[in-house]
Image: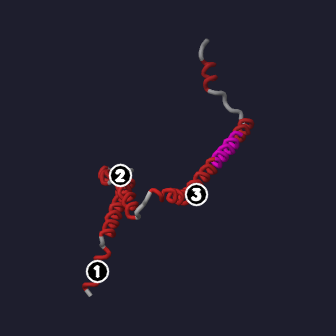
Amino acid sequence: MMDSSRTIAGSALSSDNQQDFTVETLRGLAALSVTSFQLTNAYSLDWARYSGFHGWLGVQMFFVISGFIIPYSLHRSQYKTQYFPRFLLLWLVHLEPPYLVSVALVRILWKLALLVATIFRRYVEVLTKRASKRVALPAPLSSAASSLTPT
């Protein structure tokens, strides 16, 4: 009974799984570090701000991990440069449609915001003209002050 559990534990912590576990642990620490920085950076309390002060290093940690993971995964998959066109095609198929949809959505929302702002500005102009016709507005202070000065 004891031997089977050791075998399972031994196979679960093989060299590849151990490396994956280590990388995932580092990624988790980097994510927590960035989160800590984001949550504590806005506080005015010195101790709270200082507790997450070095959290920005989590971003650099992500870059270092990516610099390890990308070549490592290419090595494990026995990548060859002849596979690049297929990789590029799959990359475009997976990433380009959501990107194009988001760009189109932003452009539509931008145009809609401009339209609403224009309609609101015209509405305010119409209300201002109506209000100025109904109520006689006082003369500006500059003209009143100039009439008081001796000539």
The answer to which of marks 3 and 2 sits earlier in the sequence is 2
Q: Tell me what residue is drawn at x 53 percent, y 60 percent.
A: 90
Q: Which mark is residue 97?
A: 3
Q: Is residue 116 above or below residue 25?
A: above
The answer to which of marks 1 and 3 sits earlier in the sequence is 1
In reply to whether residue 122 is colored magenta, the answer given is yes
Q: Tell me what residue is drawn at x 71 percent, y 33 percent.
A: 136
The answer for how far apart the CA atoms under marks 1 and 3 are is 46 Å
- Residue that carries the numbered disc 2 in the rendered image: 60
Q: Residues within 10 Å of mark 3 (few under 14, many from 20)?
A: few
**Residue type pointed to by label 3:** Pro
Q: Going by the picture, which residue comes out furthest to the bottom? A: 1
Q: Going by the picture, which residue comes out furthest to the top? A: 151
**x, y percent for residue 37:** 36, 53
Instruction: Report the side of 133 relative to 68 (left or right).
Output: right
**Residue type pointed to by label 1:** Thr
- Residue that carries the numbered disc 1 in the rendered image: 7
